[in-house]
Image (cartoon, helix red, strand yellow):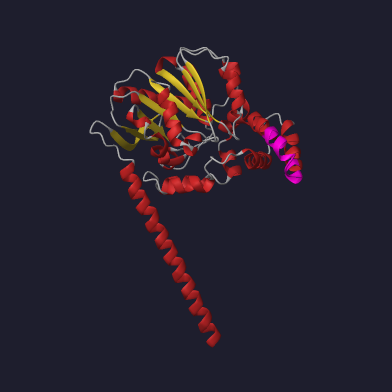
Amino acid sequence: MEMLKKIMKIAGIILAVLVGIIVIFAIVIFTIRAVNGSKYKIKSSDGIDESQYIEINGIQQYINIRGEDTSNPVMIFVHGGPASPMGYVAPYYQQPIEEKFTVINYDQRGCGRTYYANGKSFENLTVEQLERDLDAIVDYACERFGQDKVVIMGHSWGTILGTVYAKNHPGKVSAYIGVSQCISNLFDGKIVIGEKALAVASSKNKKDAEELEATLSRMRDVSDYDDMSIDDLMTAASLSSKYLACEGEMSSMGQMWTGLTSPQMNMQDVGWFMQMTNTSEFFASQRALMEYAFFGFDLNEMGSEYEFPVYYIAGSDDCAVPQELAKEYYDTVTAPDKEFVTVENTGHSMFMDNPEEFSRVVLSFFE
């Protein structure tokens, strides 16, 4: 009995300590969120900071609009993934851009807050449907802010959707910015990146090199979506990151902390982030879209002539999308203006790794 009392007492102390740690952690989080809320506040009386849902193409579409002057040109950020919305951390990397542009972030159909606002049900998503959604958002923005055209800025998967949209609607696009631009389909890109990682791993870790070589060998034999192994895809991505990631790349924990301390983040953002961790289930639920992204896209087949300026921003150590392919394609581009900028010591999401330089580069395109 005496021993049981001691155990219960120790358990009570441990529980009290854990509760105390959770309370302190929560206080720290909400304090930093409050500080960031003041830091990211739109200060101009002519500005806008608005999160809302608009009805487009039969759904409730979540959009976030920020800018210091609503008479500024409109820029629409097309997030990557597919299905990796970034609006809840947007002020972290786009605040200087908001001084010159009214920036719209939106959660694409089938993900994030848009997903939760529509009964958690989206089947058979296609790039054509997402293109129609983006077109409706462009029309909404132009009408609301008195613009004829918008700047389209896409990241990763968003460069696929963004490029498809811009090429099909040149009359509505004043400029296109590709951040970590995709050129060929995502699956081929993973192989190119994996081969670069293998060259590094071969002289550092024999076990990893053998595993990566075997994985890449199987991937080279894959010809369509049904033959693709999610496990091989994840193994190649993990080992590629291990040997190619740079010191300046923000860690997963760093990205999580940035999200938790952002005044824009809510429980739906957290819920979607947790749902994305089940990779196999997510791929299965978004089959048509994933099949296009991983096997159907080839920008070379779409041509390299543009009616508007084209700008690419690459992370020097991007270990997700091969930026050497982006540079090769860029060299063939004909456009009223073009520029390719590499941000040193950054990875696939250089706007998270070095937000100040990212914003500076974006604004430099329009000087």
In this rendering, is residue 79 above or below 231? above
Identified at 75% across, 38% down, the residue is: 213
- How far from the left and from the top, in percent, is residue 215? 73, 39
Q: Residue furthest bottom?
A: 1
Q: Main secondary structure of the magenta part?
A: helix
Left/right placement of residue 34 relative to residue 215 reads left
Q: Can residue 259 be seen in this snapshot?
A: yes
Q: Nearer the viewer, residue 351 or 216?
A: 351
Picture mark count: 0
Identified at 61% across, 43% down, the residue is: 280
Identified at 33% across, 43% down, the residue is: 39
Q: Can residue 133 be seen in this snapshot?
A: no
Q: Which residues are magenta?
A: 194-209
Q: Residue furthest left?
A: 45
Hey, which quadrant is residue 211 in on the image? Answer: top right
- How far from the left and from the top, in percent, is residue 253? 51, 48
Q: Quadrant of the N terminus?
A: bottom right
Q: Nearer the viewer, residue 143 or 324?
A: 324
Whether the magenta-drawn stretch holds residue 202 is answered as yes
In this rendering, is residue 67 above or below 326? below
Whether the magenta-drawn stretch holds residue 359 is answered as no
Hey, which quadrant is residue 366 in on the image? Answer: top left
Identified at 43% across, 24% down, the residue is: 152
Q: Nearer the viewer, residue 87 or 54?
A: 87
Left/right placement of residue 186 relative to residue 33 reads right
- How far from the left and from the top, in percent, is residue 239? 66, 42
Q: Quadrant of the C terminus?
A: top left
Hey, which quadrant is residue 183 in on the image? Answer: top right
Left/right placement of residue 301 relative to residue 8 reads right
In this rendering, is residue 169 above or below 57? above
- How far from the left and from the top, in percent, is residue 56? 38, 30
